[in-house]
Amino acid sequence: MQAVILAAGYGTRMRPLTYHVPKPMVRVCGKNLVEHNLEKLPDEIDELIFVVGYLAEQVKNHFGDCYLGRPVKYVRQKKMKGTAHAISLVQSLVRGRFLIMMGDDIYSKEDIEEVLKHERSILVKKVHSKFSGGKVIFDENGNFTSIEEGTHENGGVINTNMFVLTPEYFNYPMVPIKDGEEFGLPQTVVKMAKDFPIKVVEAQNWKQISDLDDVKDFERQLKKEGKCNC
């Protein structure tokens, strides 16, 4: 099974750290952000596919053709046209059911194992207060039905951009967002969800890394857990 890692963005909210380093390569406690995720992947993940863009050579030079015993491939997103566009670039490389994850958010080993128990799934995080982002809507069977972008006053469950999908996904046209400037992955998955059940899985330990404060908070967490010796 393959894991597709989205690592193409500019990371503008992480400047000045990202002036010379792509966001997934920002180091915390001796490892870059994406390494903190890759070391948690189960054995059934036997190949990595990076979607790279901004400062792509740094990612390619660091991970090379093989990382942690897994072959590595790369595709380049030359224009930042959204997450669905990024996934469209790997279509020719995908050979079956595949995992999608952000290269710069932090996922837990347990949550990754849980989403992989389902043929298709989306990882979400429950939020009890006001939040901005994609609010995931699901039916009485716990299957994904839609997503509502914006600011949500009364909490809900937020999309973490971790999916388990099957190749049928590529049969659905990408859904434009942001006045057509980008194409949204969760919005496109909604189209697929009308024909194939996509299980909503609640994350127990997902950390969104958006800015410098999030990086510092993650570092404090690792130190508290005794996982930061640098």
Image (spheres, rainbow, N blue to C red):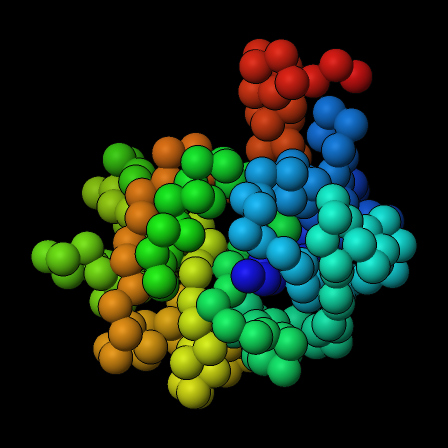
Quadrant of the rendering where the N terminus is positioned? bottom right
Residue 228 falls in image quadrant: top right
Furthest residue in direction left, as rendered: 140
Q: Nearer the viewer, residue 66 or 169?
A: 66
Residue 125 falls in image quadrant: top left
Relative to 74, residue 66 above or below? above
Is there any visible trace of residue 52 in the rendered image? no
Tell me: 62 left or right of 207: right
Quadrant of the rendering where the C terminus is positioned? top right
Q: Residue at x 19, y 55 (%)?
A: 142
Q: Position of residue 181 (x, y in %)?
A: 55, 79
Q: Residue at x 57, y 14 (%)?
A: 225
Tell me: 186 left or right of 181: left
Q: Position of residue 189 (x, y in %)?
A: 38, 72
Relative to 179, residue 162 above or below? above
Q: Nearer the viewer, residue 70 or 200?
A: 70
Total tally of numbered discs in the picture: 0
Q: Nearer the viewer, residue 39 or 220?
A: 39
Relative to 117, residue 57 above or below? below
Tell me: 104 left or right of 71: left
Q: Residue at x 75, y 33 (%)?
A: 31
Q: Position of residue 141 (x, y in %)?
A: 14, 57
Q: Nearer the viewer, residue 151 or 49?
A: 49
Is there any visible trace of residue 42 in the rendered image? yes
Q: Residue at x 54, y 68 (%)?
A: 83
